[in-house]
Amino acid sequence: QPPLFLAPSALAAVAIVAPLGGMLVASLRVREVVLTSGKALRAAGHVVEDDAGVRFQMPSEDDPDADLQPVLLPKSSVAAVRERWSLAHYADVFGSSRTSGLLRNSVALATGSALLALLLGLPVAAGEAR
């Protein structure tokens, strides 16, 4: 019989790995609206087809950090709506001008937190060792 602590550990592992795996798969999927001209427009979020046409939002081509732009196309100009595997989301993140500043702030916060923990923890550990 397996040790009793394995069941909660396995449950915790599944509770952490399953959502992270789902997010990874979702980050690699791209939804596109293909026009009759052959051009593919990358959609952000859901694509809604109704009587008014095909509605979706898309990021600006020159600045993916900008607000999403709403798009309404007549059904006659849309050839297909498709999903495919792509690294386009990662290219947007690493190509963004904001990424280096965000990474710098994250490293500064992590370094400060670690130094504060050492500053508080070392005297306590030295006191306990005596």
Image: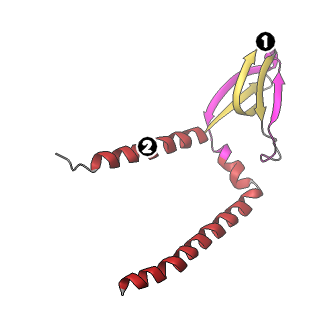
Please name the residue shown 36% across and 84% down the image: 129
- Pick out the residue farthest to the left: 1
- Residue 51: assigned label: 1
Judge from the rendering whether residue 69 lies leftward or rightward of residue 110; answer left or right. right
Give, as a three-letter code, the residue at label 1.
Asp
Estimate the x, y position of residue 19 in percent, counting from the top left.
50, 41
Estimate the x, y position of residue 114 in percent, counting from the top left.
55, 72
Please name the residue shown 69% across and 32% down the image: 45
Give, as a three-letter code, the residue at label 2.
Ala
Between 102 and 122, the one lying in front of the other is 122
Residue 67 located within the stretch drawn in magenta? yes
Between 128 and 25, the one lying in front of the other is 128
Label 2: which residue?
15
- Where residue 48 sits, quadrant-wise, is top right
Residue 20 located within the stretch drawn in magenta? no
Vertical relation: 31 (above or below) 11: above
Specify the segment rendered in magenta. Answer: 64-89
